[in-house]
Structures are given as structure tokens and as C-alpha cells.
């Protein structure tokens, strides 16, 4: 009634480690392609935030471009924004990077 290949059972794996090998390989690939570069980028961002000093031209995460005039003890920055030289206060963590030519 049924063909004989429907009645056959799949061969069982002799070693359970071999059955988990593809899953381990996928986790390894995810680690090297996703997690490791994210950790490197996070360390670079922390170095950048720690090295900020007055006179640096920075870009905030909101896209505001300005020059640091002062750094307060509570990790806030006073930024001068052109053209009207308006001063705003932002958190140090709001800085996303240095502007082109950002170091004096």
C-alpha cells in the first residue's frame, strides 16, 4: 500500500555532540559577525567620550553640531552652536562623534 521508503526510520546519531555541531557553528558565526564588532564599537565610543575636551567640535545624537566650551563635573557639556553662538547643555553620552576637523 505505502512505498517502502515511508516505512524506513532515520538513522540515529551515534554521537550527540555531532547533532549540536551545526548549532554551535551558528553561535560562533553570530559571535564573530555581530557581537564582537559591537563590543569594539562600544569601546571606541567610550574612549571618545572620555577624551572629550573644550575646543572639540562634536556632533550630538540629535544632529546638533557645536564646539565644547566647558565640561561640568556631572558629565554634562556646554556646547556653543553657531551661527548665533547659542550655548546649550547636553549629556556627555549624547555626543555621537567628532565633527570633521573636530580637534584643535
Image: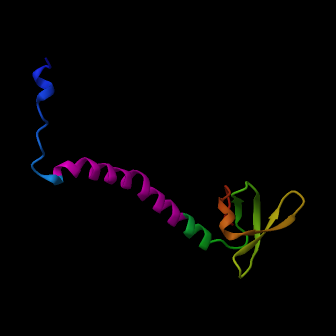
Residue 39 falls within the magenta-colored stretch:
yes
Q: Is residue 5 left or right of residue 41?
A: left
| Coordinates of residue 95 in the picture (x, y in percent) | 67, 63
Which image quadrant: the N terminus? top left
Q: Is residue 88 above or below residue 7?
A: below
Coordinates of residue 90 in the picture (x, y in percent): 75, 68
For the record, the magenta segment spans 18-44
Q: Is residue 17 left or right of residue 101?
A: left
| Colour option used | rainbow
Say which of 3 and 33 sits in front: 3
- Looking at the picture, does residue 101 appear above or below residue 104? above
86 part of magenta stretch: no
Apparent side of residue 40 relative to residue 83 in the rendered image (left or right): left
Number of marks drawn: 0
Residue positioned 14% across, 36% down in the render: 10
Q: Residue furthest right?
A: 84
**Position of 3 relative to 9 (above/below):** above
Q: Residue furthest front?
A: 1
Place of residue 77 in the rendered image (x, y in percent of width and height, measured from the top left):
74, 72
Q: Quadrant of the C terminus?
A: bottom right
Residue at the top extreme of this rendering: 1
- Please identify the quarter of the rendering in which residue 67 is found: bottom right
How far across and how far down the image is residue 47, in percent? 55, 69
Along the line of sight, which residue is nearer the eye, 29 or 79? Answer: 29
Q: Nearer the viewer, residue 56 or 16?
A: 16
Residue at 68%, 61% in the rendered image: 102
Instruction: Indicate whether 10 appears above or below 24.
Output: above
Q: Main secondary structure of the magenta part?
A: helix
* Residue at point 33%, 53% (across, down): 27
Q: Quadrant of residue 46?
A: bottom right
Amino acid at each position: 500500500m505505502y512505498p517502502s521508503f515511508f516505512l524506513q526510520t532515520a538513522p540515529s546519531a551515534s554521537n550527540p555532540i555531532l547533532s549540536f555541531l551545526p548549532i554551535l557553528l551558528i553561535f560562533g558565526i553570530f559571535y564573530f559577525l555581530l557581537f564582537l564588532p559591537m563590543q569594539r564599537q562600544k569601546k571606541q565610543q567610550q574612549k571618545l567620550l572620555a577624551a572629550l575636551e573644550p575646543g572639540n567640535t562634536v556632533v550630538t545624537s540629535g544632529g546638533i553640531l557645536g564646539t565644547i566650551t566647558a565640561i561640568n563635573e556631572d558629565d554634562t557639556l556646554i556646547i556653543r552652536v553657531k551661527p548665533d553662538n547659542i550655548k546649550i547643555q547636553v549629556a556627555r553620552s549624547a555626543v555621537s562623534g567628532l565633527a570633521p576637523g573636530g580637534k584643535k
